[in-house]
Image (spheres, grey):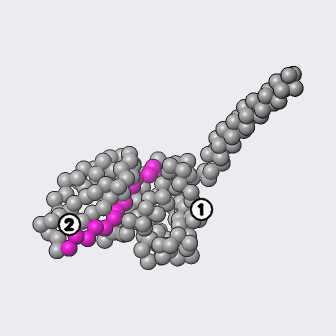
C-alpha cells in the first residue's frame, strides 16, 4: 500500500512541476520577442531591417520591410532631403514612400488633422487604426463625386523625437491596404 501512495505522490508532483514549467516557458516566450514588437501588439518584425535616420538629421531608427515582404520594396532605402530643409522623403521601392516633416514644437497637429478629416464632404473616410498619434484610414470619393468606387489607403502619424514634432504620411494618391499596413508597422517601430 505504501508503494502505491508513493507512485500517486510522484505523479502529482510531476503534474505540478510540468504545470509550473509550462507557465514559466509561456511567460518567458512572450518576453523574448523582439524589442520592437512590444509596441505594436506583438507584431513580428522578421521581414524588416533597421534604417538609421540620424545621418539625415533625425535622431531615430526605423524598421523598414525588406524585399521578402512582398510589397515591391527595394533592397536599399533612399532618403531625399535637402540640408537645412524640414522635409524628407523615405522611399523603398516604387510604392513605399513616407513623407516626413519636422514641425518643431507644435503639439496639436494630430488632433487638427483628425478634425479636418472628419469634416471632409468630398471623401468618405473609413478608419482602420485610430490611436493617440497614428491613424490609418481608407478614403474614397463621396458618392456625389465618384464615377467608380475606388478606395485608397492612407496613414498620418505624429512622433515626438528629442522634443521635436515629426509628421509622417504616405503619398497623397494613396496606397494599397497591404502597403499601408507595412508603413504603419514601420512608423510604430521608430525609436
Mark 1 or mark 2, earlier in chain: 1
Look at the magenta stretch and give its main secondary structure.
strand
Q: Residues within 10 Å of mark 2 (few under 14, many from 20)?
A: some
Q: From where the camera sits, is residue 46 visible?
A: yes
Residue to which mark 1 is pinned: 46
Q: Residue at (66%, 38%) from the top-left corner?
A: 23
Whole-percent x and y of residue 96? 44, 71
In the orientation shown, which residue stands out farthest toward the right?
A: 3
Q: Residues within 10 Å of mark 1 (few under 14, many from 20)?
A: few
In the orientation shown, which residue stands out farthest toward the front?
A: 1
From the viewer's side, name the closer residue of 25 and 116: 25
Secondary structure at badge 1 equals loop
Question: Is 146 placed above or below 19 here?
Answer: below
When asked about the image quadrant of residue 141, the answer is bottom left
Residue to which mark 2 is pinned: 141
Q: From where the camera sits, is residue 162 visible?
A: no
Q: Is residue 160 magenta?
A: yes
Whole-percent x and y of residue 138? 30, 61
Whole-percent x and y of residue 169? 38, 62
Q: Residue at (45%, 49%) from the top-left corner?
A: 160
From the viewer's side, name the closer residue of 27 and 51: 27
Q: Which residues are magenta?
A: 148-162
In three-dimensional space, the C-alpha distance between marks 1 and 2, rounded to whole angstroms, equals: 36 Å
Q: Residue at (42%, 66%) from the top-left corner?
A: 178
Q: Is residue 156 left or right of residue 6?
A: left
Residue 117 marker = none
Q: Is residue 175 left or right of residue 80?
A: left
Question: Is 171 placed above or below 4 here?
Answer: below
Q: Is residue 139 magenta?
A: no
Q: Residue at (82%, 24%) from the top-left corner?
A: 5
From the viewer's side, name the closer residue of 191 and 123: 123
In the orientation shown, which residue stands out farthest toward the left?
A: 144
Amino acid at each position: 500500500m505504501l508503494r502505491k501512495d508513493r507512485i500517486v505522490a510522484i505523479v502529482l508532483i510531476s503534474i505540478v512541476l510540468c504545470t509550473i514549467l509550462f507557465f514559466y516557458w509561456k511567460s518567458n516566450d512572450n518576453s523574448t520577442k523582439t524589442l520592437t514588437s512590444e509596441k505594436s501588439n506583438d507584431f513580428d518584425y522578421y521581414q524588416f531591417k533597421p534604417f538609421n535616420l540620424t545621418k539625415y538629421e533625425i535622431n531615430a531608427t526605423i524598421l523598414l520591410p525588406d524585399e521578402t515582404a512582398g510589397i515591391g520594396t527595394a533592397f536599399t532605402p533612399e532618403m531625399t532631403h535637402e540640408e537645412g530643409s524640414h522635409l524628407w522623403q523615405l522611399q523603398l521601392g516604387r510604392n513605399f514612400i513616407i513623407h516626413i516633416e519636422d514641425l518643431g514644437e507644435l503639439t496639436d497637429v494630430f488632433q487638427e488633422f483628425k478634425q479636418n478629416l472628419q469634416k471632409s464632404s468630398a471623401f468618405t473616410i473609413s478608419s482602420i487604426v485610430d490611436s493617440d498619434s497614428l491613424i490609418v484610414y481608407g478614403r474614397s470619393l463621396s458618392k456625389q463625386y465618384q464615377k467608380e468606387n475606388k478606395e485608397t489607403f492612407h496613414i498620418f502619424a505624429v512622433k515626438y523625437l528629442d522634443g521635436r514634432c515629426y509628421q509622417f504620411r504616405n503619398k497623397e494618391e494613396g496606397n494599397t491596404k497591404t502597403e499601408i499596413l507595412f508603413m504603419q508597422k514601420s512608423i510604430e517601430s521608430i525609436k
